[in-house]
Amino acid sequence: MSSFLDDLKVYREGLLAQGFWALQIYRFGHARFRYKSKFIRWPWAIIHTLLSKVSEIFFGIFIGPKAEIGRRFLIEHFGAIVIHGGSVIGDDCSIRQGVTIGNRQTNAPLDAPVLGSRVNVGAGAKLLGNIRIGNDVDIGANAVVINDVPANHIAVGVPAKNKPKHNKKSQL
């Protein structure tokens, strides 16, 4: 229940936010992996698959149930969002419409990005392959990220180039 309330706090639209409900459907499906018994997991998986299809059809959001998503994950604008089941996303991250976090090559279907905490992903960005995104990173809108991004950097462009964030306090 605490993750439900934690997640709800970051959504301005509250219970009306489609991203919030897509995240809760993911969390419901992911929770089944706590149990080893197939008698518990199979019915749970069937219910989750149906709910996941509802999320895809009505919200345009697919989140693989095996993905690891931290607390207070914000889907700011819904639609055309795909999150690979092998992805790992830290706490306090946010994404926008049109974002893909997935594999890069068909011969490496399990390769997926790992995002640190406080990562902000702009609309239309693509994070592809076995890459690591550090903490406190901003990914620009429509960026195509195919290489690692160190902590406290900004990634922009196609393919994305990394630029360090400037510390405003040091400029004063």
Image (cartoon, rainbow, N blue to C red):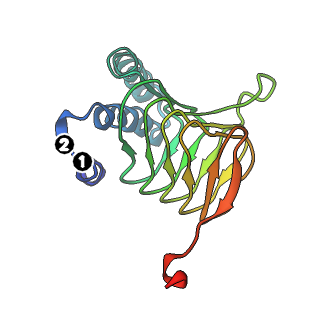
What is the total number of numbered labels drawn onto the structure image?
Answer: 2
Is residue 87 visible in this depiction of the protein? yes
Asked which secondary structure carries label 2, the reply is helix
Residue type highlighted by circle 2: Gly
- The residue carrying pointer 2 sits among few (fewer than 14), some (14 to 19) or many (20 or more) residues within 10 Å by Cα, namely some
Residue name at image x 19 percent, y 42 percent: 14
> In the figure, is residue 23 to the left or right of 138?
left
Outermost residue on the front side: it is 172
The disc label shown at residue 61, or none? none
Residue that label 1 marks: 8
Whichever of callouts 1 and 2 sits on the residue coming sooner in the sequence is: 1
Residue 10 placement (x, y as % from top left): 28, 51
21 is higher (above) or lower (below) than 55: below
The residue closer to the viewer here, 163 or 73, is 163
Distance of mark 1 from mark 2, alpha carbons? 6 Å
Asked which secondary structure carries label 1, the reply is helix
Residue 57 placement (x, y as % from top left): 37, 14
- The residue carrying pointer 1 sits among few (fewer than 14), some (14 to 19) or many (20 or more) residues within 10 Å by Cα, namely many
Residue 133 placement (x, y as % from top left): 63, 54
Residue name at image x 36 percent, y 30 percent: 78
Residue that label 2 marks: 14
Is residue 149 visible in this depiction of the protein? no
Residue type highlighted by circle 1: Leu
Residue name at image x 41 percent, y 56 percent: 92
The residue closer to the viewer here, 98 or 30, is 98
12 is higher (above) or lower (below) than 56: below
